[in-house]
Image: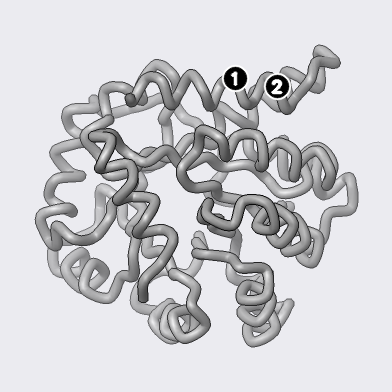
Amino acid sequence: MSSLLKKAFLNAKKESRPALLTYTVAGDNTKRKSLEILKSISEYADICELGFPHNTPIADGGQIQTSAYRAIKNGIKINDVFSIAKNFKKSKKNTPIILMGYYNMIFQYNENKFLDKCKKSKVDGIIVVDLPYPENKSFASRCKKNGVNFIQLVSPTTSQIRLKKIIKDSHDMVYYISMLSTTGGKLKVSPKKILERYNKIKNQNKSKNVVIGFGITEKTIKSLKKADGLVVGSAICKEISKSIERRQNTVTNVTNIVKRLKNKIQ
């Protein structure tokens, strides 16, 4: 499967830096504003992750939960998320977009209908937080048939045997959860330790793109720049909250953060 995701990583490698992945919650704080933020930050982000707002986001820390609650309060539904993704792709067709959510939401919506919507909205990849390997093999296979990358998750506790199987079955990107906590927590392990674990994953198959997520901020991003890609979410959601609170321009403020993050890994 030749994909925009692969191209994004290749382009970053040509510039001798990791790909920068951003995460925002769809519809925070409005559908229109969410799309504006996405379009603006994609000038600096290589890959954009867009989260489905969920009322019980088990893997997410306070900042992302706050974003999700704002979007839910504003009445954002699954079809609105696809609408944001589709409109984003109209003007940013070369920037990959990854949707991130929970399986019960996909199941309730209907798997076939969901994958059809992904295809029509030109979604490049999907992360399903609560559908681990090997339970996700069937759905991952169906994603692939629809031209959508299913992104496998690995963590510090993933055994070597299990890791081998996950990497073998993975598509164009693997997401390494850097520490056992919810998103946005302070790094509980040193960047050196994270990179050691990252290298063990990478050594399974050098051709697979492995990104690091959880606990990445303006302070920590530079120390992890040897990775294929780095995901920043909570720091962005926090900036949206601050901007709303201070009645400032969310698009400008969030774009400035993403620009600074990009500069740190150049």
Q: Tell me the amino acid under the disc marked 2.
A: Thr
On the image, numbered disc 1 is attached to which residue? 256
* Amino acid of disc 1: Asn
Percent x, y for residue 65?
67, 40
Tell me the residue at 12%/50% (across/down).
Answer: 200
Residue 237 in the image: above or below residue 182: above
Q: Position of residue 55 (x, y in %)?
A: 73, 52
- Image quadrant where one finds the N terminus: bottom left
Secondary structure, mark 2, is: helix
As helix, strand or loop, the secondary structure at mark 1 comes to: helix
Quadrant holding the C terminus: top left
Is 176 displayed left or right of 101 in the figure?
Answer: left
76 lies left or right of 179:
right
Which of 92/9 is in front?
92
- Give residue 207's quadrant in the image: bottom left
Q: Which residue in the structure is indicated by mark 2?
A: 252
- The residue at 31%/70% (across/down) is 170
Q: Is residue 53 above or below residue 216?
A: below
Query: Which color scheme did the rendering employ for the protein?
Result: one colour
Please indicate whether residue 119 sits to the left or right of residue 80 in the image: left
Residue at 43%, 77% (x, y): give it. 136
Q: Give the quarter of the image for residue 34.
A: top right
Q: Residue, x 41% and y 66% (percent of image)?
A: 3
| Vertical relation: 253 (above or below) 78 | above
Q: Position of residue 220 (x, y in %)?
A: 35, 21
Q: Observer-nearest residue: 201 or 157?
A: 201
Q: Which is more toward the observer, 250 or 61?
A: 250
- Tell me if mark 2 has few (under 14), some (14-19) or many (20+) residues whose alpha carbon lies within 10 angstroms of its own: some
Q: Position of residue 198 (x, y in %)?
A: 20, 44
